Every structure is written in structure tokens, then in C-alpha cells.
């Protein structure tokens, strides 16, 4: 008689192998934003929560109603990028 059935040993080994996967959290940060290219300053802005805060502040400071940035006219996008680069 075997003291430990082979299939039980396989299950225990598999559980030990996969336990770090089950017990560790997801450490990767998933980006939910998109990238907007600023042709005036020739750089890219990742449109994430941080950029949204600046954009909402710009809308408030310039007394504009809220419009998605990608739907703004090119001249207003340029105004935002100028304002944004002067905020540092």
C-alpha cells in the first residue's frame, strides 16, 4: 500500500507552484488614458487622471464649458497646451 496517492501529490505540488499567482496582487498599473500629441511643443501628453485635473482647472480658469479635449477646436487645444506648459 502506498502511503500517499500520486494524484494527491500532484495536486499539492500544483497548489504550491501556483500559490504566488493567487496570493499576490496585481502590481502592474493599467493605463486607462490615451495619448495626445502636442504639435506646438512637439511632445506627448498621457491623458490620464492627472491630466484631467489640469484640463478641468484650465476650463474653470478660462470660463469655458466642459468639452472633451479631442473635440475642441485646434486653436483652443493650442491655448490649453500653452497654459499647461506654463504651469510648472
Image (cartoon, rainbow, N blue to C red):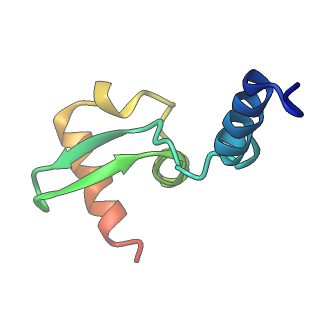
Q: Nearer the viewer, residue 81 or 46?
A: 46
What residue is rendered at 67% in x and 34% in y? 14
Q: Nearer the viewer, residue 3 or 75?
A: 3
Instruction: Residue 74: name its quadrant.
Output: top left
Q: Is residue 77 left or right of residue 33?
A: left
Image spot of residue 3 (x, y percent): 89, 34
What residue is rendered at 26% in x and 61% in y? 82
> Vertical placement of 6 versus 39: above or below?
above
Where is the N terminus found, in terms of image quarters?
top right
Q: Residue furthest bottom?
A: 88
What residue is rendered at 80% in x and 26% in y? 8
> Vertical placement of 16 versus 71: above or below?
below
Q: Is residue 85 left or right of residue 74?
A: right
Q: Is residue 57 left or right of residue 69?
A: right
Image spot of residue 32 (x, y percent): 47, 36
Image spot of residue 27 (x, y percent): 59, 52
Q: Nearer the viewer, residue 40 or 2?
A: 2
Q: Nearer the viewer, residue 25 or 67?
A: 25
Image spot of residue 19 (x, y percent): 72, 43
Amino acid at each position: 500500500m502506498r502511503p500517499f496517492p500520486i494524484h494527491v501529490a500532484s495536486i499539492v505540488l500544483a497548489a504550491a507552484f501556483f500559490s504566488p499567482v493567487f496570493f499576490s496582487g496585481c502590481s502592474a498599473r493599467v493605463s486607462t488614458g490615451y495619448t495626445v500629441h502636442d504639435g506646438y511643443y512637439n511632445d506627448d501628453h498621457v491623458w490620464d487622471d492627472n491630466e484631467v485635473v489640469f484640463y478641468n482647472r484650465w476650463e474653470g480658469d478660462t470660463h469655458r464649458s466642459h468639452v472633451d479635449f479631442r473635440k475642441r477646436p485646434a486653436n483652443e487645444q493650442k491655448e490649453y497646451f500653452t497654459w499647461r506648459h506654463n504651469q510648472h
